[in-house]
């Protein structure tokens, strides 16, 4: 009899351009069993982004309908656009014992924490604020006004780090990815989470 799998909801959060997406992508290359949640957004696709892969790109009306129908686990307005995590696939994957990764903003992370306190909340930090500023500028996907808005929020967000379980400084992608691996591995072997499943299995097993 196998040990029943327990899906973890892993929430990756941190300021814009800190590299959350890059770390998640790198991590998922070697962790094929972990499901990345695809968010919905009203933001326009950037070059190369594919509907249903990077995001579900919706118009405002569709997004509002989904809120109305309670289809989001969380949703938030981030820099004038709406973003939300479709609830169905997340809950289904967790039920099946898969770990699910959410890469979302701080407002969304706090909503998830309210609804699902068992989640694992990971905050990605930049090495310095100056470096974060460089990354936002180099990405070059935002207007000057948007860029300034994002930088202004970053420091406030970092100062709320106490609400998270773990932090990762994204100085070096390989190191940061290793740390995410270590965090998730630890959570997959947490007695607190698994005690019921362990007791269920070993109390029924025969010699
Ligand atoms: P971007 O437009 O650069 O892809 O994302 C902007 C911000 O929205 C990022 O901080 C990203 O993590 C966040 N975001 C992406 N998807 C979601 C989501 O489903 N919910 C929330 N609350 N934030 C999201």
Image (cartoon, grey):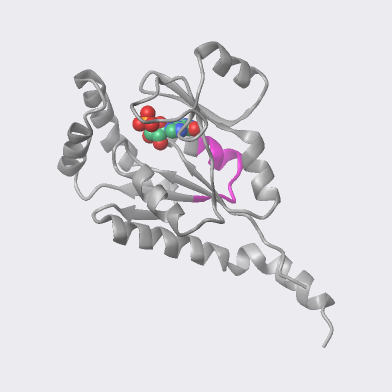
Horizontal and vertical percent position of residue 22 = 35, 46
User: Which segment did they paint magenta?
Assistant: 110-120
Residue at 44% across / 55% down in the picture? 29
Residue at 19% across / 21% down in the picture? 144
Q: Is residue 144 above or below residue 39?
A: above
Give the number of callouts: 0
**Left or right of 55 in this view: 99:** right
Horizontal and vertical percent position of residue 34 = 54, 53
Q: Nearer the viewer, residue 59 or 184?
A: 59
**Left or right of 85 in this view: 181:** left
The image quadrant where one finds the N terminus is bottom right
**Left or right of 59 in this view: 126:** left
Q: Is residue 169 visible?
A: yes
Tell whether position 111 is magenta.
yes
Horizontal and vertical percent position of residue 156 = 30, 35
Q: Nearer the viewer, residue 98 or 186?
A: 98
Residue at 23% across / 34% down in the picture? 139
Extreme residue toward the bottom, this view: 207
Q: Is residue 165 visible?
A: no
**Left or right of 202 in this view: 108:** left
Q: Is residue 164 above or below residue 5?
A: above
Picture quarter with ligand 1: top left
Q: Is residue 84 above or below residue 2?
A: above
Tell whether position 204 is magenta.
no
Q: Nearer the viewer, residue 102 or 106?
A: 102
């Amino acid at each position: 009899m196998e040990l029943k799998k327990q899906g973890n909801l892993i929430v990756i959060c941190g300021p814009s351009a800190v590299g959350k997406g890059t770390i998640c992508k790198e991590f998922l290359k070697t962790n094929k069993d972990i499901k990345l949640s695809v968010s919905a957004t009203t933001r326009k696709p950037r070059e190369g982004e594919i509907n249903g892969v990077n995001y579900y790109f919706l118009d405002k009306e569709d997004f509002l309908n989904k809120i109305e129908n309670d289809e989001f686990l969380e949703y938030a307005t981030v820099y004038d656009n709406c973003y939300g995590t479709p609830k169905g696939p997340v809950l289904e994957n967790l039920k099946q014992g898969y770990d699910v990764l959410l890469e979302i903003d701080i407002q969304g992370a706090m909503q998830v924490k309210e609804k699902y306190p068992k989640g694992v909340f990971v905050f990605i930090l930049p090495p310095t604020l100056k470096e974060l500023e460089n990354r936002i500028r180099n990405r070059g996907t935002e207007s000057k006004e948007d860029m300034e808005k994002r930088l202004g929020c970053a420091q406030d967000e970092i100062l709320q780090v106490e609400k998270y379980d773990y932090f990762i400084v994204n100085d070096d992608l390989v190191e940061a990815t290793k740390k995410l691996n270590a965090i998730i591995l630890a959570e997959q072997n947490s007695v607190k989470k698994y005690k019921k499943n362990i007791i269920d299995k070993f109390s029924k097993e025969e010699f």
